[in-house]
Amino acid sequence: MDDSRETKRVVGTRRLKEAMPKPASLRILTVANQKGGVGKTTTTVNLAAALSMGGLKVVVIDLDPQGNASTALGVEHLDNAGIYEVLMGQSTISQVIQKVAGFPSLECVSSNTSLAQAEIELVPMVAREMRLKEAIEELVADRAAVGEGIDYIFIDCPPSLGLLTINAFTSAKEVLIPIQCEYYSLEGLSQLLKTFELVKKRLNPTLKLSTLVLTMYNNTNLAQDVANEIRKHYPNELIDIPIPRTVRVSEAPGFKQTVMTYDPLSPGAIAYMSVARELAERGKPFDSNVVSINYKREGEIA
């Protein structure tokens, strides 16, 4: 790498690490989309990394049995206790949470292969939908007892609408939905919103659909049409900074990194950092951008 390129990288990295505003209170965001391959995990880990680089204290909970978020953050997870043991009542989050290397204020609660059994094992349990919520509340209480706060908790869901995702919805204050810029994503969004509305009605009345992020964007008519539909129906929830489809974003997990550290000056990293800054700005007191949606009026996308 030549000196000029290295100088630009150093300067760019410093800019990426500029401080972001702390939220008025702890923000717990469930990142969900039952359609696979839409950039859900990629969005989770890169936003978490970007916010941490901005000086905020962030926790990622990997609730997907595939464990991709754990891999991208470079934490041990295949043979380690993680969120499965927490859901089964065998451990607390404080006992299994891990620091993410290279980020002084980023932590991860990992997934492992046992989590695939959780959907079945949760069925006969009392208050099965509240297991994760109770565990998070215990973590927050543990940190408060030693004078430590958490600014953001991201829950990365599996690509399904089963008990794990319902636990995530019940635990969260907000839902963040990554939307791939293609037609099928619009169909999947309507189904996801039905589950969201059901959980909001019966289990978590304060839950809000706060954020939509456009992922895998390329400059085609279809992508622009999908983006325009989302802008029309969800102008307040959409962070209108599309994440481009780039090789560097896809390569980073292979090196057990987020794109924020793998190539901080790449278009994908810059886009995710911009989305993270907007997310942080919306979390400042008073947050007038996060609003509830009247689903009877605009719950379906034509």
Image (cartoon, rainbow, N blue to C red):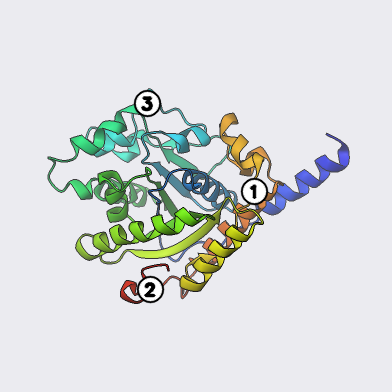
Q: Is residue 84 visible?
A: yes
Q: Which of marks 3 and 1 is nearer the N terminus?
A: 3
Q: Is residue 232 above or below residue 147?
A: below
Quadrant of the snapshot with the C terminus: bottom left
Residue at 32% from the left image edge and 37% from the top image edge: 83
Q: Mark 1 points at which residue?
A: 269
- Residue located beneath label 2 in the image: 298
Could you tell me how far apart the alpha carbons at marks 2 and 3 are, in whole angstroms?
44 Å
Residue at the image position 48 percent from the left and 31 percent from the top: 75
Q: Which residue position holds label 3?
A: 80
Give whichever of 114, 52 is nearer the camera: 114
Residue that lies at the very extreme toward the right in this rendered image: 3
**Label 2, residues with CA under 10 Å away: few <14, some 14-19, many ≥20:** few
N-term-proximal mark, 2 vs 3: 3
Horizontal relation, residue 58 to residue 223: left or right? left
Q: What residue type is labelled 3?
A: Asn
Looking at the image, which residue is at 40% across and 35% down? 110
Which one is closest to the eye, mark 3 or mark 1? Answer: 1
The image shows residue 155 at horizontal and vertical percentages of: 39, 48
As displayed, is residue 25 above or below residue 153? below
Q: Closer to the camera, 35 or 148? A: 35
Q: Is residue 143 above or below residue 82?
A: below
